[in-house]
Image: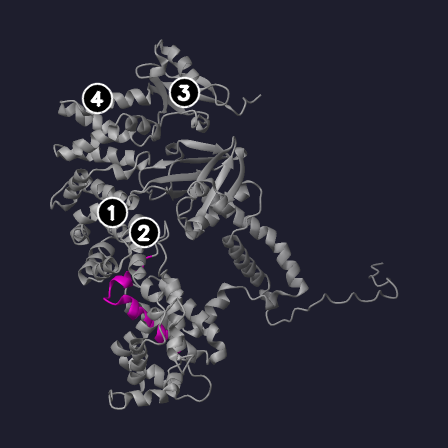
């Protein structure tokens, strides 16, 4: 008879003694009682001075809240209690012996990741002690590195506020960042501490901004250490993200990000200097890209004042460049009343007062800025687009003004102008770091694409929305190819003409018109179970190979990973923490935790996941919610995932559903099912090529008049 579900068998270690095998009741007996019982094995008195910790992995302390997570076969260790350990370490780090202090700080840096220990150490004013050690300036090398590591780990638990940090501490940390020659480990931790200060305290932002400038951080981008580069860009992003929203600050940010020197260093030393680029670095580059484009938000949300003569003169300048060539200042005011025909030829919706076209936000005045940039910087292209369409009389002219406004709105959506960066997103584009006016140049490339696609589709005004849909698809497909420069983007777009888009669309979806006859539908229904079983086996095989997942919720820009894979007999789910992202499969021996598949009750996704509900106070972006799923298992426990991408999300949710005998309902399954069924049906129908398949089976012939038609061998 199997033991009750709330009874687990574990091994308990004690230094210098044989391990003891015991059964632990996770429901009825408190941890204190277990410790008292266990300490009796080795005749240890004062059981209240002891605690249980995991022997492997992070070696966390066991508490009343976490004891339900103990699994069968776990190895535990009897150790001194968190309070006793905190007291001893606090005394040791204040000792006069350098070696003893170094060992204490090394152990403290490791233990500080444990929330139970951290709470005890913080209650003893431990953070203040570490801060004073840093402020004293007497620690160097390894000793300082471990001090900063412990400080950062303790603050990361969120038990105390960052607002309590003193100005002298900030100056000391900033000094390490500004020093030309400083140990790499100290620099990493200093950058991470400053980033956490900026992100977690409005008051500390101003103090850090006074000590650290973006110009001082640029030097750290030119090193060969990708970790240092990542921390430096993360701090730059934090300073921009938390900057006050005033005109002076926005202007300073814009000028800093527009510096050719900064972009050149990021492009040459960070993007091109690192192969491959790690996920966290890619995320920081994506954040920097979004923050750069967010500088356009003010213009995007500014409406044009139809009565503002200066703004109306900009529209007049567009008309002049297109139709007048050289400016003739004489009689300008008298001639403006006659310009409505020209404004209509420019493609404005309101050709009497085209300023009204810019009163909607987005794109607001940003659209007018883009049009003026095209007219002045790429004048020949602008004049060609306007004149070749204004001279047409076949209803196929492309309205430049309307197209430019809608295109600007579309580009704002694609590049997330005015939105906060998405957590975990790595979708940055190197080409935006290659040009002084990357946004405007990108618009110029896309408006030429729109004009070309309009002609290829032979579109009229009624086809405007269809053309914009095709152009959006062309742009998003080209961006997905990650062109490294604007010239490469142009080449990608040239290959994605309207005919190619139609071909891609046709190849990506199975034409339903050819598969509607009853015999074909019946064949499809017969094939479908075989294909679903094939997909199911593929999903389970992928689960057996396993996947690496990144831990979220860590305010520091330091990657932590864990790996999960299914046993080969599909009966156990193995998982465990990793120090770094693996290059291949992780052996089962390195995965210390496991869940029997028979204990799994269900799989939930998105907002239903416990780890998404816990973070409800923070801004949860759509992409993270779409990649989140949780495995619920007995007794009322969860294993929480955030997939690295949509493909892995579909693989794992499908695989877990297959294990539970439920339907695989992901988009990937539907796509694979359609593709494989289409291929299988085409293979089976090869012999019927050029033969018309009847809509209904042929009629059954009449019965013969007699059945005496067999051959008589006699």
* Residue 53: quadrant of the picture: top left
For the record, the magenta segment spans 428-452
Q: Which residue is mark 1?
A: 205
Q: Residues within 10 Å of mark 3 (few under 14, many from 20)?
A: some
- The residue mark sitting in front, 1 or 2, is 1
Decide which of tag 3 and tag 4 comes sooner along the chain.
3
- Please say whether residue 435 is one of the residues in the magenta stretch: yes
* 189 left or right of 447 in image: left
Query: Residue at image x 29%, y 78%?
Result: 375
Query: x, y (%) of residue 252?
Result: 21, 59
- Please say whether residue 286 is one of the residues in the magenta stretch: no
Decide which of tag 2 and tag 3 comes sooner along the chain.
3
For this rendering, which residue is in front, 283 or 537?
Answer: 283
Q: Which residue is mark 2?
A: 283
Q: Which residue is mark 4?
A: 91
Decide which of tag 1 and tag 2 comes sooner along the chain.
1
Position above or below: 4 against 292: above
Secondary structure category for the residue under label 1: helix
Q: CA distance from mark 1 to mark 2?
A: 22 Å
| The C terminus sits in image quarter | bottom right
- The residue mark sitting in front, 1 or 4, is 1
């Amino acid at each position: 008879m199997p033991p009750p579900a709330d009874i687990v068998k574990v091994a308990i270690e004690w230094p210098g003694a044989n391990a003891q095998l015991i059964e632990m009741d996770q429901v009825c007996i408190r941890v204190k009682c277990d410790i008292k019982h266990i300490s009796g094995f080795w005749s240890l008195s004062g059981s209240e001075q002891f605690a249980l910790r995991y022997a492997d992995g992070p070696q966390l302390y066991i508490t009343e809240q976490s004891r339900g997570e103990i699994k069968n076969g776990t190895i535990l260790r009897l150790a001194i209690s968190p309070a006793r350990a905190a007291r001893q370490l606090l005394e040791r780090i204040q000792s006069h012996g350098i070696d003893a202090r170094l060992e204490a700080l090394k152990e403290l840096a490791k233990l500080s990741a444990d929330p139970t220990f951290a709470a005890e150490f913080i209650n003893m004013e431990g953070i203040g002690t570490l801060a004073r050690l840093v402020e004293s300036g007497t620690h160097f090398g390894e000793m300082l590195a471990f001090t900063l590591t412990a400080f950062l780990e303790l603050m990361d638990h969120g038990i105390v506020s960052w607002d309590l940090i003193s100005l002298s501490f900030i100056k000391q940390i900033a000094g390490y960042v500004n020093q030309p020659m400083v140990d790499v480990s100290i620099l990493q931790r200093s950058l991470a501490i400053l980033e956490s200060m900026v992100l977690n305290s409005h008051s500390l932002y101003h103090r850090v901004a006074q000590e650290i400038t973006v110009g001082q951080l640029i030097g750290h981008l030119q090193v060969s250490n990708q970790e240092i580069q990542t921390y430096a860009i993360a701090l730059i992003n934090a300073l921009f993200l938390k900057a006050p929203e005033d005109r002076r600050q926005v202007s300073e940010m814009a000028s800093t990000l527009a510096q050719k020197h900064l972009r050149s260093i990021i492009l040459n030393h960070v993007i091109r200097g690192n192969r491959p680029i790690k996920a966290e670095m890619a995320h920081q580059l994506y954040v920097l890209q979004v923050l750069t484009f967010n500088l356009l938000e003010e213009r995007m949300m500014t409406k044009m004042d139809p009565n503002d003569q200066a703004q109306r003169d900009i529209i007049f300048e567009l008309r002049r460049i297109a139709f007048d060539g050289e400016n003739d200042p004489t009689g300008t005011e008298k001639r403006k009343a006659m310009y409505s025909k020209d404004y209509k030829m420019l493609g404005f919706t309101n050709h009497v007062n085209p300023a009204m076209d810019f009163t909607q936000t987005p794109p607001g005045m940003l659209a007018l800025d883009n049009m003026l940039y095209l007219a002045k910087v790429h004048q020949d292209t602008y004049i060609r687009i306007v004149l070749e369409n204004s001279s047409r009389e076949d209803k196929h002219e492309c309205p430049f003004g309307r197209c430019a406004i809608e295109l600007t709105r579309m580009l704002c959506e694609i590049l997330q102008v005015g939105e906060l960066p998405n957590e975990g997103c790595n979708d940055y584009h190197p080409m935006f770091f290659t040009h002084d006016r990357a946004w405007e140049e990108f618009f110029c490339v896309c408006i030429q694409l729109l004009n070309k696609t309009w002609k290829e589709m032979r579109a009229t005004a009624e086809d405007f929305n269809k053309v914009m849909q095709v152009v959006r698809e062309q742009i998003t497909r080209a961006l997905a190819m990650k062109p490294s420069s604007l010239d490469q983007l142009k080449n990608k777009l040239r290959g994605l003409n309207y005919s190619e888009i139609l071909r891609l669309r046709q190849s990506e979806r199975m034409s339903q018109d050819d598969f509607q006859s009853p015999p074909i539908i019946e064949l499809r229904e017969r094939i479908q179970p075989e294909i679903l079983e094939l997909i199911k086996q593929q999903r389970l095989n992928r689960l057996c190979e396993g996947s690496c997942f990144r831990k979220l919720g860590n305010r520091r820009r330091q990657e932590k990973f864990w790996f999960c894979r299914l046993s080969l007999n599909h009966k156990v789910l193995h998982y465990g923490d990793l120090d770094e992202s693996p290059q291949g499969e992780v052996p089962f021996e390195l995965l210390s935790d496991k869940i029997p598949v028979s204990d799994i009750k269900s799989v939930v996704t998105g907002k239903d996941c416990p780890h998404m509900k816990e973070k409800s106070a923070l801004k949860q972006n759509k992409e993270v919610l779409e990649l989140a799923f949780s495995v619920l298992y007995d007794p009322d426990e969860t294993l929480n995932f955030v997939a690295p991408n949509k493909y892995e999300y579909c693989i794992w949710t499908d695989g877990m559903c297959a294990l539970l005998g439920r339907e695989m309902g992901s988009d990937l399954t539907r796509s694979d099912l359609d593709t494989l069924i289409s291929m299988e049906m085409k293979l089976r129908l090869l012999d019927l090529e050029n033969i018309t398949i009847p809509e209904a089976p042929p009629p059954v012939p009449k019965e013969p008049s007699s059945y005496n038609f067999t051959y008589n061998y006699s």
